């Protein structure tokens, strides 16, 4: 076997000389003649007869060549060289094709890189392909991610056999403080000690958490993320061993993790998960679990094993009733829903762009195939088979698409970088937008497939020529009608797809503008917000909190440059609490049927700060909110929904908290303008405002309107009252709104870019087809003009076909755009008939213009020149 | 008279290998030898002979060397390699099995028709 392989290899590389075979054949012929002479023939007869017997030498030579291993490589390389020559010979034509394909393939590679990172690629940690997220799920309400309790976690961990690691964390906000350093709020994860060995990561400085740390009574320790070490401690090397306070509890810094390590995600501080009596309750669900599957175990199989354990737990413990378990990859857990749909939509959209590009290129090649028929006919006449010609042309197409693809790879690299920057701080840190082998595979497949896709029809057309027709006739008059329906179909297809893309982009932009126009009365660029949490240990009751906030308000208002300041449970547009409501004299017996409302608890002056106009009634006074003086202000919309057609001032209602306990009766004292508080809720609940005294929370938002940046003075104001209190989530309201709509802004931009590129390609496509068709009808048009056809006759003649294509394309596209709008509605993007109309109108005008250009030229032809046109 | 194209697929290879098993030979010699031994039944034209020789050489079963012919002309001589000898043996076995199977069937057909 080995010697045979080596022989094969030797002949694969080395070629025999042609002259060897010639010598051998000559010898054969001479022997044959000699034999015949010996048999008694005359020399010339012997020679003649031997030659007849001998037959053709050329076929033998070809046959011998074909025995060589890898002989076809020579043929292919010949084809490639020929294709290269042909590409270079039509430089501008080829450049147009390569540029079109570079856009198509480049954008597809980019989007696939993103989709791969968001939905497919394993998390970039060791054994990331076996890393899963384990949560419970509520079987009754079909909620997919319910945290686990500590006892549940331990039962799963002990009984499960299909996991190498099974770890858990809690996520909370942790305040890091120490002498001489202002307190700061961070993302704190309390983790089981195996969390670090699970992802095989050691500390950059000091040590990670160790099993000894989670023993009850162990000395409390904290591990810092690299960014905290850099930002808070300026990379101080002697940080290990320092005593700090974490949320009021003292702890020792024992380690700093390597740069960019934030596992599971976005963590700043890690502390050991030490069992406490509170943690030991089976209904205290605060744990998220992460696990490494044993090699070869699928998440589904592992899920089945945990289901069995979960069934036992459910039957054993009443707290676990109605709970199942779910084992998902990171992508499935954290990038589901809206994100997944948006990325898949993007992949579909960019696929459309490539299809449009291919249609464009196919049309260009089709129009040239008419000019190439002469070349192909000659090759056929010289003995090339149809398959050989088709193969040759396909090699040319694939070569073109590969050139385009390589150019597009640079484009992809650039746009991935843009997307990476645009989503920094928004995307989870384990999503890394980089290319990997699947991406390159996808890229290579795209190059080959798109080459075949746009190349096959023109190749078949070019090769299907009758030698006689072409050689005796003028090339352009043959086949010009055969090609017509195909290029028309391609144009219709392009217009339909472009319309779908433009509608998609339109829906994104419509939603974006919608969101930006929310709450127009608020001067969002002047308003700064930050949240403040009063720890229960130091602020035990409502009185203490009211006292603190009243004092803080005075200090905020006295800050220089501050026009208004207020404190509310949620900054405008940043969400609200929900409770069930019951109106006086309208009791509802079944608690499930009570309607829900949203509310914001606030301190006096809030309406002025956000410039919310009061339409009726008045603002709260100082006594309202105290016992027996419960009051509320409703938005106009809420009033109309709760008391339709009545004057709501003076009406009373009460709210029910999550333990179904009613508040005292609350009187409506005012009606405000409408306002959006829950930006992402498609079906917002009626919104009302209550005084803080009525609903005393420990976590409030400070809202300050100021020309300058007041954040520094806000911090000082807070810390002059309590040095241990950090401000969290500080934002200009405008930026906060931006943060909420990043999704719309980025995807809107992406979709708009795709749609505009598609529109450009489609209009170039229709222009090229009409112009080419017109060109080949120059003589006919000349005759018509000579016979008295008017300008409008000619315009109509030329444009008729194009206008039909545009009309059909738009109709098909509109039909396809409706299901798309439905998919987009499922992720909260409302569409509007205006979008469909304006997009259709835009496409129609572009199409008509693209047809009109060649038509105008045709109408202006000089009949004498046109008739002589070759 | 059957020409080489009528030969069973692969039979030509077998014939060449068998012929070369005796001594190294040039192409003309191989064709002549096959014709003589088969009593003029099998005549191999150059159009089949040389592609077959090239095929066998590319497979490493025979090896070509330039030498001088009987009448002192330069000619290419083919000889069997060790791999070729092994191949010949297995092809002969296959042939024997095949031909005895075919003759079994033919024999039965002949008897049935009587």
Image: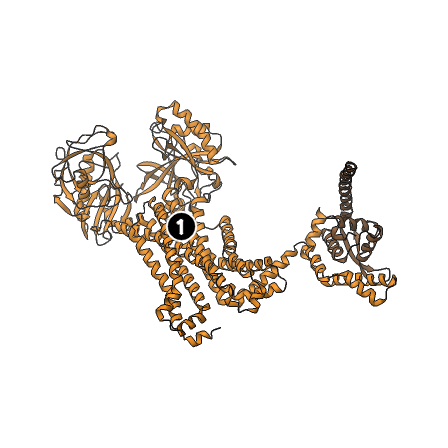
Chain colours: A orange, B brown
In depth, the one of A527 and A132 nearer the eye is A132
In depth, the one of A208 and A675 nearer the eye is A675
In depth, the one of A682 and A669 nearer the eye is A682
- Looking at the image, residue A475 lies above or below residue A302: below
Which percent across, then down, holds residue A381?
62, 64
Q: How many labels does the image show?
A: 1
Which percent across, then down, holds residue B61?
75, 50
Q: Can residue A176 be spotted in the picture?
A: yes
- Looking at the image, residue A101 lies above or below residue B108: below
Tell whether A61 sits left or right of A409.
right
Which percent across, then down, holds residue A651?
13, 36
Tell me which corner region of the image, top left, top right, bottom left or bottom right, holds residue A280: top left
Task: Residue at the far bottom: name it.
Answer: A864
Which percent across, then down, holds residue A51?
78, 63
Q: Name the residue under label 1.
A: A346
In depth, the one of B54 and B35 nearer the eye is B35
Tell me which corner region of the image, top left, top right, bottom left or bottom right, holds residue A589: top left
Task: Residue at the far front: name it.
Answer: B114
Q: On what subunit does the disc labeled 1 rest? A: A
Q: Is mark 1 on a helix, strand or loop?
A: helix
Tell whether A526 sits left or right of A356.
left
Q: Which residue is drawn at 48% across and 38% down?
A: A130
- Looking at the image, residue A692 lies above or below residue A743: above
Q: Can residue A726 be spotted in the picture?
A: no
Give neighbour class at mark 1: few <14, some 14-19, many 20+ (Cα, 10 Å).
many
């Amino acid at each position: 076997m080995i010697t045979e392989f080596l022989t094969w290899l030797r002949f694969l590389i080395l070629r025999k000389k042609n002259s060897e075979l010639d010598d051998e054949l000559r010898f054969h012929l001479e022997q044959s003649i000699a034999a015949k002479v010996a048999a008694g023939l005359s020399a010339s007869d012997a020679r003649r007869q031997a030659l007849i017997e001998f037959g053709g030498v050329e076929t033998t030579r070809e046959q011998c060549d074909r025995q060589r291993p890898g002989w076809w490589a020579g043929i292919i390389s010949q084809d490639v060289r020929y294709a290269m020559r042909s590409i270079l010979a039509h430089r501008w034509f080829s450049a147009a094709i390569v540029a079109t394909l570079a856009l198509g393939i480049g954008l597809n590679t980019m989007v696939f890189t993103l989709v791969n990172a968001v939905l497919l690629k394993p998390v970039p940690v060791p054994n990331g392909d076996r890393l899963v997220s384990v949560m419970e799920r509520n079987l009754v309400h079909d909620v997919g991610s319910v945290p686990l309790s500590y006892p549940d976690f331990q039962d799963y961990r002990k009984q499960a056999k299909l996991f190498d690691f099974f770890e858990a964390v809690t996520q909370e906000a942790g305040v890091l403080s120490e002498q001489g350093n202002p307190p700061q709020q961070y993302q704190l994860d309390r983790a089981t000690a195996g969390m670090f060995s699970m992802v095989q990561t050691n500390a950059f400085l000091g040590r990670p958490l160790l099993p000894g740390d989670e023993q009850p009574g162990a000395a409390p320790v904290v591990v810092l993320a690299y960014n905290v070490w850099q930002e808070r401690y300026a990379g101080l090397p002697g940080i290990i061993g320092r005593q700090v306070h974490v949320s009021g509890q003292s702890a020792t810094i024992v380690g700093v993790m390597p740069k960019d390590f934030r596992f599971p995600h976005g963590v700043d501080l890690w502390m050991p998960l030490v069992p406490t009596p509170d943690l030991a309750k089976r209904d205290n669900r605060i744990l998220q679990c992460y696990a490494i599957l044993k090699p070869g175990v699928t998440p589904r199989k592992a899920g089945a094993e945990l289901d069995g354990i979960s069934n036992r737990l459910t039957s054993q413990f009443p707290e676990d009733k109605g709970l199942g378990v779910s084992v998902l990859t990171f992508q499935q857990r954290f990038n589901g829903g809206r994100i997944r749909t948006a990325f898949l939509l993007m992949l579909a959209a960019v696929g459309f762009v490539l299809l449009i590009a291919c249609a464009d290129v196919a049309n260009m090649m089709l129009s040239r195939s008419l000019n190439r028929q002469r070349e192909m006919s000659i090759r056929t006449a010289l003995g090339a088979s149809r398959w050989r010609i088709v193969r040759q042309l396909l090699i040319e197409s694939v070569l073109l698409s590969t050139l385009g693809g390589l150019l597009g790879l640079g484009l992809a690299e650039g746009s991935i970088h843009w997307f990476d920057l645009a989503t920094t701080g928004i995307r989870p840190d384990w999503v890394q937008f980089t290319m990997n082998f699947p991406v390159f595979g996808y890229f290579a497949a795209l190059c080959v497939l798109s080459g075949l896709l746009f190349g096959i029809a023109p190749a078949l057309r070019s090769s299907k020529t009758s030698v006689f027709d072409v050689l005796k006739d003028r090339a352009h008059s043959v086949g010009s009608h055969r090609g017509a329906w195909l290029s028309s179909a391609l144009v219709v297809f392009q217009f339909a797809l472009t319309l779908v893309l433009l509608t998609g982009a339109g829906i994104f932009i419509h939603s974006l503008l919608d969101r930006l126009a929310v709450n127009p009365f608020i001067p969002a660029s002047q308003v700064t917000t930050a949240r403040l949490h009063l720890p229960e240990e130091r602020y035990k009751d409502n009185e203490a909190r009211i006292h603190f906030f009243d004092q803080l308000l005075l200090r905020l208002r006295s800050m220089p440059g501050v026009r208004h300041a207020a404190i509310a449970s949620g900054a405008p547009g940043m969400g609200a609490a929900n409770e069930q409501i019951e109106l006086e004299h309208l009791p509802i017996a079944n608690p499930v049927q009570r309607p829900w409302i949203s509310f914001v608890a606030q301190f006096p002056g809030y309406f002025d700060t956000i410039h919310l106009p009061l339409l009726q009634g008045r603002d709260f006074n100082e006594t309202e909110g105290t016992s027996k003086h419960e009051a509320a202000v409703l938005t106009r919309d809420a009033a109309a929904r709760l008391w339709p057609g009545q004057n709501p001032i003076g009406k009373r209602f009460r709210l029910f908290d999550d333990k179904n306990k009613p508040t005292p009766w609350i009187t409506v004292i005012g009606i405000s303008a409408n306002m959006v508080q829950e930006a992402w809720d498609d079906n917002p609940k009626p919104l009302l405002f209550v005084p803080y005294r009525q609903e005393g929370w420990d976590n409030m938002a400070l809202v300050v309107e100021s020309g300058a940046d007041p954040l520094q003075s806000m911090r000082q104001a807070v810390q002059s009252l309590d040095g241990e209190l950090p401000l969290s989530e500080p934002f200009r309201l405008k930026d906060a709104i931006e943060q909420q709509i990043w999704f719309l802004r980025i995807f809107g931009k992406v979709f708009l870019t795709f749609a505009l590129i598609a529109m450009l390609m489609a209009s170039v496509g229709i222009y090229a087809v009409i112009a080419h068709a017109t060109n080949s009808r120059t003589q006919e048009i000349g005759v018509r003009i000579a016979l008295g056809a008017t300008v409008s006759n000619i315009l109509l003649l030329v444009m008729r076909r194009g206008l039909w294509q545009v009309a059909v394309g738009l109709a098909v596209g509109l039909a396809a755009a409706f299901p798309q709008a439905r998919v987009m509605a499922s992720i909260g993007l409302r569409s509007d008939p205006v979008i469909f109309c304006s997009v259709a109108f835009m496409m129609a005008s572009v199409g008509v213009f693209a047809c009109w250009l060649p038509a105008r030229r045709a109408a202006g032809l000089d009949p004498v020149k046109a008739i002589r046109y070759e | 008279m059957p020409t080489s194209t009528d030969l069973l697929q692969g039979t030509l290879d077998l014939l060449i290998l068998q012929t070369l098993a005796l001594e190294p030979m040039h192409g003309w010699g191989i064709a002549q030898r096959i014709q003589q031994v088969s009593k003029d039944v099998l005549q191999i034209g150059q159009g089949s002979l040389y592609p077959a020789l090239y095929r066998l050489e590319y497979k490493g079963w025979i090896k070509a060397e330039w030498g001088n012919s009987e009448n002192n002309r330069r000619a290419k001589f083919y000889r069997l390699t060790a791999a070729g000898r092994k191949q010949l043996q297995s092809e002969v076995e296959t042939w024997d099995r095949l031909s005895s199977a075919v003759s079994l069937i033919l024999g039965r057909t002949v008897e049935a028709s009587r």
